[in-house]
Amino acid sequence: MEWKKDKAIYLQVIDLFKANLMNGKFKMNDKIPSVREYSMELNINPNTIAKVYEILSEEGWIEARSTNGYFISANQQMISDLKTSTAKEYCKDFLLHMQFCGFEKEEIINFLKGSENDVIRMP
């Protein structure tokens, strides 16, 4: 994975983790990689992963179970809310970019209707 230079790595890892929740890679009660395993997988410092896990735990996404490791504690409502808020942010950014390009509301709607079949469908 290549990390962006304009955003702290730990924030990018949190984003990646939440993306994995939204796309179903991580599910409720799943055991997630240990700090050491995840740091090796992402090729980053274990202290960074420890910080990420601490933040995710404080936010209620994961929980540490003594001697068993870390598990997903997020419920379906939390994940649904995350999906909705993330989608709204993406839409807001998209609309701002389209307006920047000079598109009016109706043009944006027509563009989206025309692009409907271009979207890659995920299995």
Image (cartoon, rainbow, N blue to C red):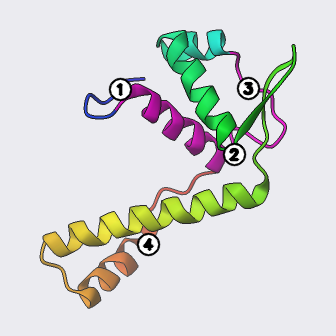
In the image, 75: left or right of 49? right
In the image, 123: left or right of 1? right
Q: Position of residue 90 (x, y in %)?
A: 40, 61
Q: Position of residue 17 (x, y in %)?
A: 58, 36
The disc, 2 or 1, on the residue closer to the chain's N-terminal end is 1
Residue occupied by mark 4? 116
Q: Position of residue 20 (x, y in %)?
A: 61, 40
In the image, 65: left or right of 7? right
Which numbered disc, 4 or 3, marks the residue closer to the eye? 3
**Rendering quarter of residue 116:** bottom left
Q: Are marks 2 and 1 in contact (CB under 8 Å)?
A: no
The quadrant the N terminus occupies is: top left
Residue occupied by mark 2? 24
**Rendering quarter of residue 111:** bottom left
* Kind of residue sitting beneath label 3: Ile
Q: CA distance from mark 2 to mark 3?
A: 13 Å
Q: CA distance from mark 4 to mark 2?
A: 23 Å
Residue occupied by mark 1? 3
Placement of 23 over or under 65, stated as above or below? below
* Kind of residue sitting beneath label 1: Trp
Residue occupied by mark 3? 32
Tell which residue pokes out farthest to the front in this image. Answer: 58
Q: Magenta segment range?
A: 8-34
Secondary element at tag 1: loop
